[in-house]
């Protein structure tokens, strides 16, 4: 298996292409994408979700162990801060 794969990140009908390492966890990938996209006009808090593949991905899963390959697209999904969620549920 290759040590890197080519993926796209999709947000607001636009896609940005990346080559990512496969030897990192999904949680680390999200951290790296936050750094790579720093300065872009994005929501403050977000995560990634695999488009067109309904699989559950945990932050501790290694990319190489997931059914992710060249050309897959991840959607950037805005999330609320924990505090905002707690305030709404009161």
Image: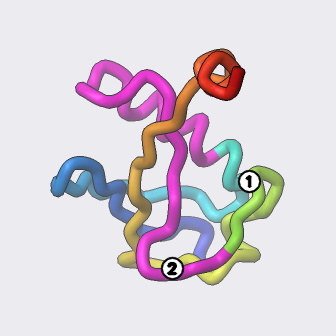
The x and y percentages for residue 57 are 70, 65
Residue at x 50%, y 68% (from the top left corner): 50
Residue at x 51%, y 79% (from the top left corner): 69
- Res. 9 image quadrant: bottom left
The x and y percentages for residue 56 are 70, 70
Q: Would you say residue 35 sits in the magenta stretch?
A: yes
Q: Would you say residue 52 sits in the magenta stretch?
A: yes
Q: Is residue 29 above or below residue 69?
A: above
Q: Which residues are magenta?
A: 29-55
Please give the residue where the numbered disc 2 appears in the rendered image: 69
- Quarter of the figure that contains the C terminus: top right
Q: Is residue 46 above or below residue 9?
A: above
**SS for tag 1?**
loop
**SS for tag 2?**
loop
Q: Is residue 7 above or below residue 66?
A: above
The x and y percentages for residue 11 are 28, 49
Please give the residue where the numbered disc 1 appears in the rendered image: 25
Residue at x 54%, y 66% (from the top left corner): 4
The x and y percentages for residue 12 are 21, 49
- The 10 Å Cα crowd at callout 1, few under 14, some 14 to 19, many 20 or more, is some
Q: Nearer the viewer, residue 8 or 87?
A: 87
Q: CA distance from mark 2 to mark 1?
A: 15 Å
Please state the total of marks drawn on the protein image.
2
């Amino acid at each position: 298996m290759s040590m890197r794969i080519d993926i796209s990140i999709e947000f607001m009908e636009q896609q940005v292409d990346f080559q990512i390492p496969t030897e990192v966890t999904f949680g680390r990938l999200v951290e790296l994408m936050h750094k790579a996209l720093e300065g872009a006009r994005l929501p403050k808090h977000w995560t990634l979700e695999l488009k067109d593949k309904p699989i559950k991905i945990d932050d501790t899963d290694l990319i190489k162990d997931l059914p992710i390959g060249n050309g897959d697209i991840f959607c950037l999904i805005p999330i609320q801060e924990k505090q905002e969620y707690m305030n709404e549920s009161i």
